[in-house]
């Protein structure tokens, strides 16, 4: 089986973009899961805002 230069570049790009796609999808799934969980911690900016209101 012979792989041409064009076929090699296609394979490399396909693997690279495929890996980025899987990474983005898994990150999105984790973020949706974290936002929906009842034990989600508030964002750091909102904690600073609440601390400022207490003073």
Image (tube, rainbow, N blue to C red):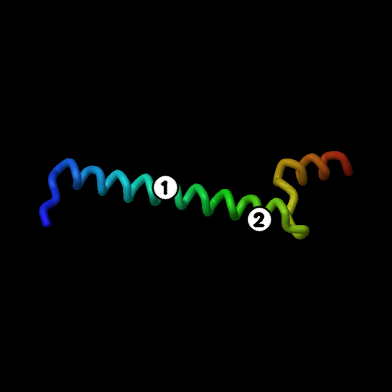
**Can you give x and y, in whole percent of width and height, for residue 31 in the image?**
62, 51
Left or right: where does residue 11 sit relative to residue 48? left
The residue at which mark 2 appears reads as: 33
The residue at which mark 1 appears reads as: 20
Left or right: where does residue 52 sit relative to residue 7? right
Looking at the rendered structure, which numbered label has been put on residue 7? Answer: none
Q: Quadrant of residue 38?
A: bottom right
Q: Secondary structure at mark 1?
A: helix
**Can you give x and y, in whole percent of width and height, for residue 23 in the image?**
47, 51
Left or right: where does residue 46 sit relative to residue 27? right
Q: Residue at x 22, y 43 (%)?
A: 9
Q: Quadrant of residue 17?
A: top left
Q: Is residue 39 above or below residue 31?
A: below
Residue placed most toward the observer, 1 or 48: 1
Q: Residue at x 19, y 47 (%)?
A: 8
Q: Quadrant of residue 50?
A: top right
Outermost residue, left side: 2
Crowd rating for badge 1 (residues with CA inside 10 Å; few <14, some 14–19, many 20+): few
Residue placed most toward the observer, 14 or 30: 14
Residue placed most toward the observer, 11 or 32: 11
Q: Secondary structure at mark 2?
A: helix
Is there a contact, CB below 8 Å, between mark 2 and mark 1? no
Residue placed most toward the observer, 36 or 52: 36
**Viewport quadrant of the C terminus:** top right
Left or right: where does residue 53 sit relative to residue 40? right
Q: Residue at x 77, y 46 (%)?
A: 47
**Can you give x and y, in whole percent of width and height, for residue 28 in the image?**
57, 49
């Amino acid at each position: 089986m012979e792989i041409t230069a064009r076929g090699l570049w296609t394979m490399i790009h396909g693997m690279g973009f495929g890996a980025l796609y899987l990474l983005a999808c898994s990150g999105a799934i984790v973020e949706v899961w974290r936002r929906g969980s009842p034990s989600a911690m508030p964002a750091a900016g909102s904690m600073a805002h609440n601390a400022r209101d207490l003073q």
